Amino acid sequence: MRAVWLREFGGPEVLVPGAAPDPVAGEGQVLIDVAHVNLTFVETQFRATGLGPFTGALPMIPGNGVGGTVAAVGPGADPQLLGRRVISSTGGSGGYAERAVVPAAGLHLVPDGLALDAATALLADGRTARLLLEAASPAPGARVLVLAAAGGVGTLLVQLAAHAGLHVVAAAGGPAKAALAAELGAAETLDYRQPDWSARTAPVDLVLDGVGGALGRTATTLLRPGGHLLSYGLASGSWTELPQSEIDARGLTVLTLRPTPDETRAATAHVLAEAAAQRLHPVIGRRFPLAQATDAHRAIESRATLGKTLLDI
């Protein structure tokens, strides 16, 4: 089968297309004919440094999320899964390929009426967005600042928060990204490429921060006394640092996202159902063929993409 190999850590050019043995479904596993691969920013960080939530010895086929059709089932897996459209995490490797083997227990069936590419785009970011709002549990009408509002998680957060009756303040990099956030339901938009961006809105009750670094730190200055911060990513390369003395002085609450497997599965099912009902619309901004994984990583790292980037097979 065709695949993309990672044999050393480094720039996007270390992703090299090549042949790989066809995987075989083992006990409790299924074989998926992959149609779409869900790319995340954290995969670019792992490719560059080897650091992050994924593990595996090099050389490896990277990729943590796929959507496709079940082509074979291993011993102990339900034969009725054959031919079903599914999405699944791979555990951190094996996704950039024409076929992938995953545990049957981790599959999510794609609802009727939902396109497979849209379901794949929801796999990682959709559940994250849902879990963030569940963890923060803001009151109806609360002012919520979403950083990187035009990204994969951000575009879904804006929609889910707006549908929940929250006042969404969307911060994004550039006019096109701010315009997209407004189309998705943001009540206010801010361009954080402008040096005074944080002075252009009122205090907020909650900051949802997937960026970190200096941008995340500036966002915390917008929190009202008693406000909440939930950081879930470090696209800038570092987490948002907020001194404990300031947390105490301002009465802030710093939340963490630590969902159980059951909560994660429920969140995925929720966003798939919402998308099937046309209440949630994943934004697929860029698509690349499998052999152009290098170009896909470059596009993501350039911050030029909107919403989700997919590899199509």
Image (cartoon, helix red, strand yellow):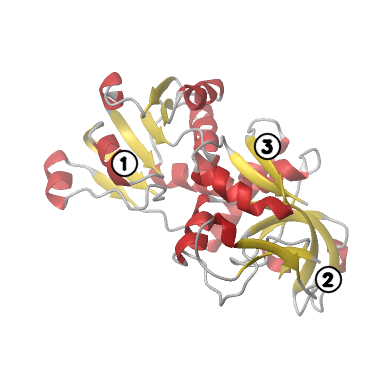
Q: Which residue is mark 2?
A: 73
Q: Is residue 267 left or right of residue 104?
A: left
Q: Earlier in the sequence, mark 2 or mark 3?
A: 2
The 10 Å Cα crowd at callout 3, few under 14, some 14 to 19, many 20 or more, is many
Q: Residues within 10 Å of mark 1 (few under 14, many from 20)?
A: many
Asked if disc 2 and disc 1 are in contact, CB closer than 8 Å, the reply is: no
Q: CA distance from mark 2 to mark 3?
A: 28 Å
Give x and y (percent) for residue 141.
40, 25
Label 3 element class: helix
Q: Is residue 54 visible?
A: yes
- State the separation of the CA atoms marked 2 and 1: 45 Å
Q: Please tell me in which quadrant of the rendered image residue 215 appears.
A: top left
Quarter of the image for the N terminus: give it. Answer: bottom right
Mark linked to residue 216: 1
Describe residue 118's horizontal placement relative to residue 142 as left or right.
right
Q: Is residue 130 visible?
A: no
User: Going 44% across and 37% down the picture, which residue do you hit?
Assistant: 148
Q: Residue at x 21, y 48 (%)?
A: 242
**Is 31 above or below relative to 182?**
below
As rendered, which of 204 and 149 lies closer to the eye? 149
Which mark's residue is nearer the viewer, 2 or 1?
Answer: 1
Q: Is residue 231 left or right of residue 55?
A: left
Q: Which residue is mark 3?
A: 275
The x, y position of residue 197, in whole percent, is: 31, 25
Mark sitting earlier along the chain (2/1): 2
The answer to whether mark 2 and mark 3 are in CB contact below 8 A is no
Give the secondary structure at mark 2.
Answer: strand
Q: Quadrant of residue 277?
A: top right
